[in-house]
Amino acid sequence: FDFACVEGACVCLAEEHQSDNDNCACEGPCEGGQVCNAGQCLTPPLEDCDGGVCVATAALVPAGPFIMGPDPLGNAPQREVTLTRSYWVQRTEVTQGQYEDLMGNNPSRFQNCGSDCPVEQVSWFAAIRYCNALSVHEGFEPCYDGEGAVIGGETVYDCEGWRLPTEAEWEKAARGTDGQTYPWGEEEP
């Protein structure tokens, strides 16, 4: 058997589908936020600055089942949800510095916190404007129109550019590959 990089992980290939022996050095999914690059599990930089605009690098969240819920108020029970598509999500919240670099302003109430703190005081419409601006900056078609509807498609899954994650996508990403209760583990905050 040999290995190849498939959707951010090194996977075993059947002998009839062998890849270049030098192309993959790791076996199994990359862990700890690493990505598969040229056959090795590597930690990407936390920020990538291009043209004076810095954005967090993204992590690939694989398609598949996970246990979702319960909601914070206990109104919805736990249930198995299956996401049918892999997707990319920023590794961190959008920082004040990233937002200001791209949008030209910082709406945060706690600006003395520093440019690495999450941007807050952002409405849903401001968030989708950020997604659209990031899409244009990176050469993608924006996802949303001025009213917040998906441009040229029926669902957010038709978008080419950056968009806000669905509730299920956000929870699967936050739970991590081992399905933990909180992003930091099982202990309550």
Image: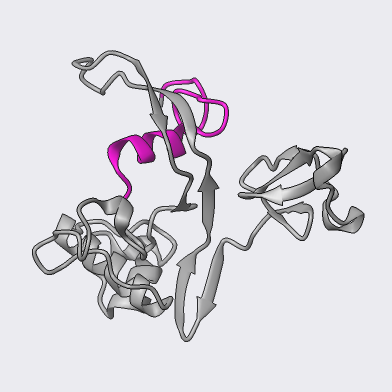
Residue 72: x and y in percent read 25, 23
Residue drawn at x 31%, y 60% is 159
Left or right placement of residue 165 versus residue 149 in this view: right
The chosen color scheme is one colour
Res 160 quadrant in image: bottom left
Residue 91: x and y in percent read 49, 52
Quadrant in which the C terminus appears: top left
Count up the numbered dots.
0
Farthest residue, direction right: 21
Farthest residue, direction front: 16
Residue 84: x and y in percent read 43, 37
Q: Is the magenta stretch mostly helix, strand or loop?
A: loop
Res 29 quadrant in image: top right
Residue drawn at x 84%, y 48% is 18
Farthest residue, direction bottom: 51
The correct choice, above or below, for 54 with respect to 77 in the image is below
The correct choice, above or below, for 158 with respect to 183 in the image is below
Q: Does the magenta stretch include residue 117?
A: no
Left or right placement of residue 41 versus residue 180 in this view: right
Query: Is residue 153 among the parts visible in the rendering?
Result: yes
The correct choice, above or below, for 112 with respect to 87 in the image is below
Magenta span: 165-188
Residue drawn at x 55%, y 71% is 48
Query: Is residue 123 among the parts visible in the rendering?
Result: no
Residue 41: x and y in percent read 74, 50
Quadrant in which the N terminus appears: top right
The correct choice, above or below, for 126 with respect to 66 in the image is below
- In the image, 149 versus 76, the foreground residue is 149
Residue drawn at x 28%, y 70% is 142
Res 123 quadrant in image: bottom left
